Amino acid sequence: MDTRAVVILREVCKIIIPAVLLFALYVQFHGEYGPGGGFQAGVIFAAGVILYALVFGRETAQRILPLTTVRIFIAAGVLLYAGVGVGTIFLGGNFLDYNVLLHDPKHAQHLGIFLIELGVGITVAAVMITIFYLLDEFCE
Amino acid sequence: MDIAILVNFSLLTLMMLVVVVLIRLKSLLGVALTNGIYSLLSAGLFVTMDAVDVAFTEAAVGAGITTVLLLGTIAVTGMEQTVSRHGKFLPLVVIFITGAALIYGTLDMPPFGDPKAPIHTHVAPHYLTESTNEIGIPNVVTSVLASYRGYDTLGEVIVIFTAAIGVLLLLGKTVGKRNK
């Protein structure tokens, strides 16, 4: 590719990628009020990282997010989700019955939904990034 | 003409055109990109049905990340479709039988948008009227997805988790060996 085209691509991505990641966080934490939630946020976050890896090279992206770290996050999200469920059992409720998490049921529901959506977001983002890393590495 | 009908009509026509293009394309690169366009159009259709959460997912997952991952897969497998050794007759018969069975299955269904359909009279009214009292968040979709149907969502997350395990098992070993 022409060097000047690469410069333009890199500079545009430097502006876009922070906005993409910020938007992912907005979708993640605003899912209770607007459209969106863990699934969409995870995918958007992964798209930001994948864009970074495409433009600046996978090695550069893996200096921030190595494959081993991302692999841990795949399981961490599921564990967080299921952990909330097990936690509610220990607090005397049913599996994933958030009402027992806090004294006020509505606050408890808020907390439960926040935590499990976070788990969903972490797993989805990590899975998408992992699949991209592996495919990209396999192509070489 | 009603603007909603006009929008629906143009979206559905475009989707049909995209499908015809998809069938006729031989280049897998083109297929992956056209697939993304199809997803984006169906996201538009979901918006006209006021299902913004579904539309958002379709746009982000279907049009966005799936296209990228498909392109990544094509980079591994090659750009051209291998020519099928089967005749054209058998696939046509299979498609006709499947299509006829699907249409036969829809005959029992309530008309599109029928307010008395079972799906609108079972638990949906409870979710719509009581979720503000029980869950206390404005987005009913999130209430249903994350609280009333928390089990199902856990299952969905595990499906995605399993997908990653599958890809890691298939490609992770080769990639890991090459690095050593």
Image (cartoon, coloured by chain):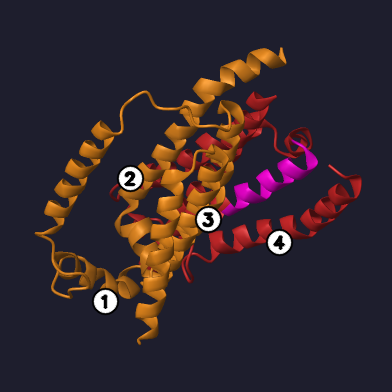
Chain colours: A red, B orange
Q: Is the residue B78 above or below the residue A54 in the image?
A: above
Find residue B118 and name its label. none
**Chain to which the residue tagged by mark 3 belongs:** B
Find residue B60 and name its label. 3
Find residue A19 and name its label. 4
- Distance between the Cα atoms at labels 1 and 3? 30 Å
Crowd tier of the residue under label 3, counting other residues whose Cα lies within 10 Å: few below 14, some 14–19, many 20 or above = many
4 and 2 marks on the same chain: yes
Nearest to viewer (mark 2 / mark 3): 3
Residue B2, percent from left and from top = 35, 86
Is residue B78 visible in the rendered image? The answer is yes
Q: Disc 1 designates what residue? A: B129
Tell me what residue is drawn at x 58 percent, y 22 percent: B172
Crowd tier of the residue under label 4, counting other residues whose Cα lies within 10 Å: few below 14, some 14–19, many 20 or above = few
Q: Is the residue B75 above or below the residue B106 in the image?
A: above
2 and 3 marks on the same chain: no
Residue B164, percent from left and from top = 50, 32
Q: Is the residue A22 above or below the residue A74 in the image?
A: below
